[in-house]
Image (cartoon, rainbow, N blue to C red):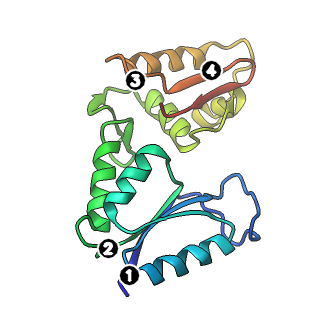
Amino acid sequence: MPEPAAVAAPEATHGAAPGATVASMPNRVLLAEDDRATRESLARALELEGYQVRAVADGSGVLEVIAEEPADVLVLDLMMPHVGGLTVCQRLRARNDRTLRMDEAARRAWRDGRELELTKTEFDLLQLLLRNAGIVLTHSTIYERIWNYDFGPDSKALSVYVGYLRRKTEAAGEPRLLHTVRGVGYTLRPP
């Protein structure tokens, strides 16, 4: 039996009870395995752990399904005929290279293949929002994490930097990533 390769969400919560709903626990699994017995066995095991599993027989099935219905976790057989697990990973990464991408070590960010020229504060703010994508961060949380100081409700510094980031991330007409949640804070939602 070939070894499956897993591409998992980094915030997975281990040890949750079967069927438990944990906000940070990925629950939609897309499984690709060409051997039917192995595929069915893995799917059953994952379902018993509380995951929603969709199983396909090959890499081309993964690419079709993922376009319609995103998954939280992919479990891929490396040695499938036609389109193997590594090819699937390469194709999915190539798609993502065209969206908003960040190299934290090099402190560089791109959107749709276009590199963003960011100041230190803009990069730090974008990094914080990307790490917490989909989560609404309050003004005071952002102030504390970026400036180590809460400037209070009258400060406009945060809204100014969000404006800078919006102009840079939407410069070529791309859809909005940074969203305001009135009276609360900001969140990053992929388009």
Determine the residue positioned at 41% across, 15% down.
167
Residue behind mark 4: 180
Q: Secondary structure at mark 2?
A: loop
- The residue under label 1 is which amino acid type? Glu
Task: Please tell me which of labels 2 and 4 falls first in the chain.
Answer: 2
> In the rendering, which numbered label is found on residue 78?
2
Few, some or many residues within 10 Å of mark 4 (<14, 14–19, 20+): some
Task: Please tell me which of labels 3 and 2 falls first in the chain.
Answer: 2
Determine the residue positioned at 62% across, 37% down.
145
Q: Are marks 1 and 2 in contact (CB under 8 Å)?
A: yes
Q: Secondary structure at mark 4?
A: strand
Task: Please tell me which of labels 3 and 1 falls first in the chain.
Answer: 1
Q: CA distance from mark 3 to mark 4?
A: 15 Å
Q: Secondary structure at mark 1?
A: loop
Few, some or many residues within 10 Å of mark 1 (<14, 14–19, 20+): few
Residue behind mark 1: 3
Q: Nearer the viewer, residue 149 or 153?
A: 153
User: Is 171 above or below relative to 108?
Assistant: above
- Percent across and percent down for residue 53 are 57, 64
Determine the residue positioned at 40% across, 73% down.
33
Give the residue furthest to the front. Answer: 36
- The residue under label 3 is which amino acid type? Thr
